[in-house]
């Protein structure tokens, strides 16, 4: 049997890298009073206005109870609002409010600067390859998870 090398086990390396990236980036937006989940929701709604809670949860890969608590906290702070979906009265459409947009526009440049610093040693072609590899892995997971 071949020896197991954890450092060459890609799921481990990706999980470890993801955690480190999240913790480091979080220092950027914690100064604004945001938790990681709040930043992810804020960014997702800025990129895709009018999602439901289920759609937000699916896109940021978070369970329903955590999404509900985060949305309630963000709504209480005035960063987003929920309105009944006219096509489905059980669902609510979530959008950023003016203060939510202002917060996003304050944090986005800081997050982008953090990303630029992380990737500044990678040539543009390598960055594009990295994005393509991530997309390929996500598509493969979609295939394996759906059956």
Image (spheres, helix red, strand yellow):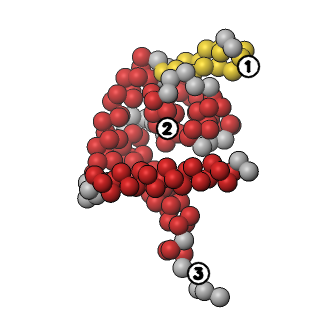
Q: CA distance from mark 2 to mark 1?
A: 24 Å
Please state the horizontal and vertical placement of residue 44, each as a whole percent of the image: 49, 33
The answer to whether residue 121 shows anywhere in this view is yes
Give me the residue at 46% from left, 55% from top.
Answer: 133
Look at mark 2 in the image and give the residue it sits on.
40
For the N terminus, give its image quadrant: bottom right
Report the Cα–Cα distance between label 2 and label 3: 35 Å
Looking at the image, is mark 2 or mark 3 earlier in the sequence?
3
Against 35, residue 13 (above or below) is below
How far apart are the alpha carbons under marks 1 and 3? 49 Å
Closer-to-camera residue (124/5): 124
- Give the residue number, with chain letter if any, for mark 1: 90
The residue under the point 50% across, 74% down is 8
* Residue at the (29%, 48%) spot, across then down: 116
Element carrying mark 3: loop
Furthest residue toward top? 86
Towards the viewer: 137 or 5: 137
Q: Nearer the viewer, residue 1 or 120?
A: 1
SS assignment at label 1: strand
Q: Which residue does the image show at 54% across and 75% down from the upper left?
A: 6
Residue 89, x across and y down, in percent: 72, 15
Counting residues from the N terminus, which is met first, the one under dot 2 or under dot 1? Answer: 2
Q: Which residue is mark 3?
A: 4
The reply to whether the C-beta atoms of the residues labelled 2 and 3 are less than 8 Å apart is: no
Q: Position of residue 102 (x, y in %)?
A: 37, 23
């Amino acid at each position: 049997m071949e020896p197991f090398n954890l450092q060459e086990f890609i799921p481990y390396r990706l999980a470890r890298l993801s955690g480190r990236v999240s913790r480091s980036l979080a220092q950027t937006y914690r100064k604004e009073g945001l938790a990681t989940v709040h930043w992810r929701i804020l960014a997702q709604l800025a990129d895709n206005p009018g999602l439901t809670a289920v759609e937000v949860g699916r896109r940021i890969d978070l369970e329903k109870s955590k999404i509900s608590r985060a949305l309630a906290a963000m709504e209480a702070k005035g960063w987003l609002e929920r309105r009944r979906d006219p096509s489905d009265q059980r669902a609510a459409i979530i959008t950023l409010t003016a203060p939510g947009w202002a917060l996003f526009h304050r944090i986005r440049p800081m997050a982008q600067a953090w990303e630029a610093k992380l990737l500044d040693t990678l040539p543009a072609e390598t960055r594009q390859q990295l994005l393509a590899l991530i997309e390929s892995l996500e598509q493969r997971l979609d295939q394996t998870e759906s059956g």
